[in-house]
Amino acid sequence: MATGAARRAIPRISTRGSYDLRTGAATRRQSRYTLWPPRRFESVAGAAPEIAIVVHGMRNGRAGAAQKFALAQRRLRALGYRHPVVGYTYDADVRGAHAAATAARAARTAEAIAVRNGARLAAFIADRAAARPRARVRLLGHSLGSLVIDGALRSLDARGMRGAVESVHLFGASLEEARAASGPSRRAAARVVRRRVVNCCCATDEVLRAAAAAGEVRAPIGLAGIRASRRPARYSQRPLRARNHRFASYLAALRSFP
């Protein structure tokens, strides 16, 4: 029998346990994805004509991820969005991220894990499309979650899934401009996203500024966006006055969705 917490929890798609949190190496627990709690996920999102999938950023364990999903749901509800909100959670709480001596290595590990999770997010979207061809999917990603989404769009494009995603919203994206404006990502955004890709950026984001200054992330699009000459089709930039890099700050500054 489901616990009270499970009954109240925001349903999530999980790939946790698939990668070593120190090295990023694949573990023996590899799986495409799991749905939690399975019955609640089906009851909340199963027959819905549309869902919004929230992808969290780095340094989020299970509890932190659940908090981010709840924050997103509350804000989207306040903005009038009435479709189900679900989470996508992965091995983002890599070891060594909080120590200066190992932070750069941990960031590279987290990035590699995020990119590889793109195929798993794509697998869920493809499975949902096969079961419910007319159902819509919107993606929201914070910080490192932007790499998961970029990887998912590329994977869906490779599957030939045109228009599989209704819209994408990125918040404080650590995705580098060179990758976002590359041929594979530009083509994926143009062919897979039906409506638009909205990059909610903030020029004063202290975390992205520090990462860019240290050379850890080159030209993150969450800081200055993508130059006009390199922007993908259906791409738009929405400057937000976020107080800091936290997802809560970006959500508080969001004035409309979708």
Image (cartoon, grey):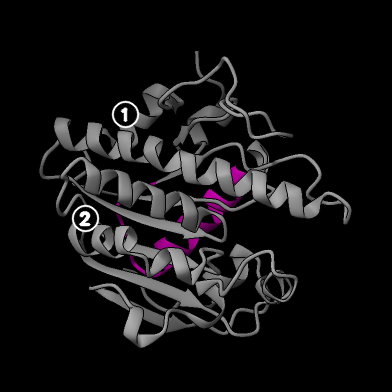
Kindly identify the residue that appears in the image at 56 percent across and 55 percent down: 144
Q: Please check the rendered image and state whether residue 228 is part of the magenta-colored stretch, yes or no.
A: no
Left or right of 239: which side holds 92? right
Q: Mark 1 or mark 2: which comes first in sequence?
A: 1
Kindly identify the residue that appears in the image at 33 percent across and 85 percent down: 229
Task: Pick whichever, 98 or 26, lies toward us.
Answer: 26
User: Residue tagged by mark 1?
Assistant: 42
The quadrant where residue 155 appears: top left
Residue 239 percent location from the top left of the image? 48, 84
Magenta range is: 65-85
User: Residue tagged by mark 2?
Assistant: 192
Left or right of 69: which side holds 83? left
Left or right of 62: which side holds 95? right
Look at the picture and state if 90 lies above or below 146: above
Task: Pick whichever, 42 or 103, lies toward us.
Answer: 103
What amino acid type should be assigned to the residue bearing mark 1?
A: Glu
Look at the picture and state if 68 lies above or below 43: below
Q: Residue furthest left?
A: 134
